[in-house]
Amino acid sequence: MKLHRLDLTGFGPFRETQTVDFDAFDGDGLFLITGRTGAGKSSILDGVSFALYGSVPRYDGGDRRLRSDHSFLTDPTEVRLEFTVGGARWRVTRAPEYERPAKRGGGMTVEPARAELDEWVDGRWVGRAAKLRDVGQLLDEVLGLTATQFQQVILLAQNKFSRFLLAGNTERQQLLRTLFGTRRFEEYKDALDERRRDARSRLDEGGARARTLLDVAEQAVAAAALGTDDAPPAEDDIATRGALLERAVDRAAYRVEARGHERDAAVAAAEAAATRHAQLTERAALLAELGAARAELAARETEAPAVDLLRARLKEARRAEDVRAALDAVDRAATALATAEREHTAALGDWIEHGGDPEDDLDARIETLTADITRSQAAADAERRLRDLDETAAQRAAELAAMVAALAEIEAQIAAVPPRRSAVTEELAASRVAASRVDDLAATRAALASRLESARTLERLTPEAAAAEAAYAEASAASEAAVRRVRDLLQRRLRGYAGELAASLDPGEPCPVCGAVEHPAPAVHADEPVSDDDLTAAEAARDAATAAERVAGSAAGAAREALAVAAATAAGHSVAAVSTELAARESDLADATAAAGRLEALATSLAGLDELETAARGEAAALTERLSSAREEQAVADAERTAIRRDVESARGAHPSVRDRIAADDAHRARARALIDARRSAAERRRGHREAAADLDARLAAASFADADAAREAMLSADERDALDARLADHAAALAAARSRALELELQTVDMTVGDGEIAASAAAVAEAEAVRDAAIAAAASAASAASGLRDLLLRIDEATAAIAGLADEAAATLRLADTVAGRAPNTMKMDLETFVLAAELEEIVCAANLRLQEMSSGRYTLHHSDARQARGAASGLGIEVRDAHTGRQRSPQSLSGGETFLASLALALGLAEVVTSRAGGIRLDTLFIDEGFGSLDPETLDLAMRTLDELRAGGRVVGVISHVETMKEQIPAQIVVAASSDGPSRILQDAVVAG
């Protein structure tokens, strides 16, 4: 990670925009940030941290007011940082939350916090995120470090410089895991743990399956009575239980063979009894069938006289069929003759009824009527023309009336325009006056709305502030109680150390303090002993209570501040009073807005009235001209209609119309023609009837029938004849079949007899044999099923037993590997795989750090990686100890003095940066900052530290040092000077110093 440029506006001690160009120090590699105490040197690092993470390390848990106290109310506050990570250049812009004057209504308002993130792509900045949450999430992905980790390896801020050196193993593990990307080893451990659980589960399932199968098999043995009276083996003795099951399978096989022999004998006996019964039943059936055949033959012979009568009736019906066609022809001729005579009578009556004479010459009359109809056709055409002219005249009259009405309406509209124009002009003037008040009313309403919101906020915040103050008091009391609890436990534990040591003494064993093997007066506990867990729990409760107190205090302060702002903005006005006044102004504004909205419509309406009057006058003139022309056309049409009407009335005569006269003449001519046709048809039907009657007489004589009625009496329909014929054939066939079957059965049953109880006795014998057979078959099937089931269970038990052996070997190997990787036994170091990898990285970091620490401490101190086991489940293998060459012993880094801690922390931070940067794919640390700490070094040690920092120029790394030590000012030419101006705000001077 490399920083390029930092812009600070209204931030910390800087009111106007101040810029730091980090790229200007690429050639030097080392630069100094200097200035008087309090000028704002550390505020540069605060700006870097705030831009990247939205937080400042110096303000953790305390005041977070980042806005410059020197800024005017209207001045902005903003931090902008350009940096490169992984070859991509980014620009992040952040602004904290601060108060500014409200744009409307007076008073103050809160400017919300904001953030933007851009990426340099193809020569321009491209926006990637513009919300606090989105910017934070994207920066987490880009940076790869949390704020705490950033402060441990890049931004070595005041009071946090030595955090990595003095950190616990767990905290150090989290930082190293992020820097070296070793979380995959944790995933390997989890995957092996999952395989370990699966292997144990499969092994347990295999054993349970084998025992379950044995239980089922033993239940089946007991149910089939195949067991012995021996005592049952233990439930987990799978081998013995399997051997007993094998012997039960052998006994089941023997039982299957015995039941098979019994079944075969029973089946043979049942088949013999069934054969004997079938033969006896067959003889009885033949004898019964013989009796039935004899009865059938006698019945058929009894029906012979009736059958002869039916045969004679069928013969007579066939003779009557020869005259059927002649009878039908006579009937048809008679019907046609009667119809023709009725039609002639009707036609003659119709002719006489309409003025005709029976003696008229119909042909001559038809010719006269035809000539009259021809002459009337021309008059009919004129009559149609007259109707069309009448319809046209009616339409013209309606059009004339409509034009007269339209002309009157237009004249009425023209007369109504002047009063309407006057009314619209007056309304337009009034609306212009009302619309001129919109802006003033809107401003008044906005001010009242802001005042109302402040009054409501004041009402809402008053109880909230009281509740926050109460919560703060309660949290303070709880924090004090938790602190007292920890103090009491520590005092009790100090008092009880002697008792704890005495409790661990054994007679004859040396005392770990004095070495004596005799313990004449061991101490005893005065109070209940205090364990590490008790003390840890109390400290955790104290920390939680302290954090809760800080949170409650911040909430109470924020509530007090918000309440004061709301009270100042509300200016003593109540919600009810402001609401009433606001409602009145909103009503006035609505009326004024409505009036402004009507202005355009009223102007348009006024212009429309003028256009309407002009158009109406032009339309009235045109309509008057059209009315005059239409009246002239109507007079010409009336003269033509009068002439045509005279001709039509002459041709019409006594009829309603000419068309009616033509229709009457045509109907009279049609009646004459109908009478001629009826006379001709009647004569033809009389001749046909006489010919059909003569043919019928000849056919009756030939068929030997006395008359037509006798022939009709003898006739049968085709269905009746077919039914008689079929009945005669059926009787003949049935009689022949009965005679044949009776003869056949007589021959088959010669000397054949069956006793009365013989069949019942045979059936009882068959039923008894079948019952014995079924029981034997069921017994054999049951024995075979039991034996098959036991053999199947035995095979499955053998398979399950073999599987258990394989699973046991696999599970043992998996369990050992998973436990070793997870840091469990047999892993004597209790170090998991990820910690092992990180321990190797830490060992290399310590080696890199010692190259500088030995020089800076003149060979006295070296860091040592410790893999000692930690208490209470803490991560092992990530410890750091300091070896003092003067004493030859290793001790905790916490035992170093302030200056020694600074040197060790600096060496470790630089070693960490080198190792992380050297890792392929790791986070490259191209920029480091060190904030103070050099003032605690003596001149000789400071000179060693400066030589170490000077060596960091190699490799392109840039290191910024914040210090007011004069010696460092002399040795580091590249500087940034933070100078406080006479009027208060500080300025950053970089270009002048670099140029000098």
Image (spheres, rainbow, N blue to C red):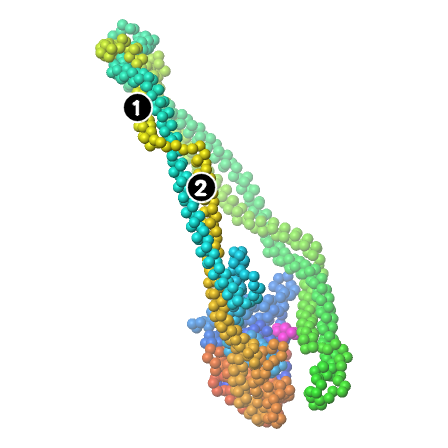
Residue at screen point 48% across, 76% down: 85
Q: Does the magenta portion include 330?
A: no
**Cα–Cα gap, marks 2 and 1:** 45 Å
Point out which mark residue 732 bears.
1
Q: Quadrant of residue 487?
A: bottom right
Residue projecting furthest to the front: 751
Q: Which residue is mark 2?
A: 766
What kind of residue is marked 1?
A: Ala
The kind of secondary structure the magenta stretch mainly shows is: loop
What kind of residue is marked 2?
A: Val
Residue at screen point 57% across, 93% down: 859
Point out which mark residue 204 bears.
none
Left or right: 824 in relation to 508: left
Rate crowding at label 1 as few (under 14), some (14 to 19) or many (20 or more) other CA atoms within 10 Å: some
Q: Observer-nearest residue: 115 or 577?
A: 115
- Magenta segment: 60-67
Q: Observer-nearest residue: 382 or 181?
A: 181
* Residue 310, image x, y percentages: 32, 18
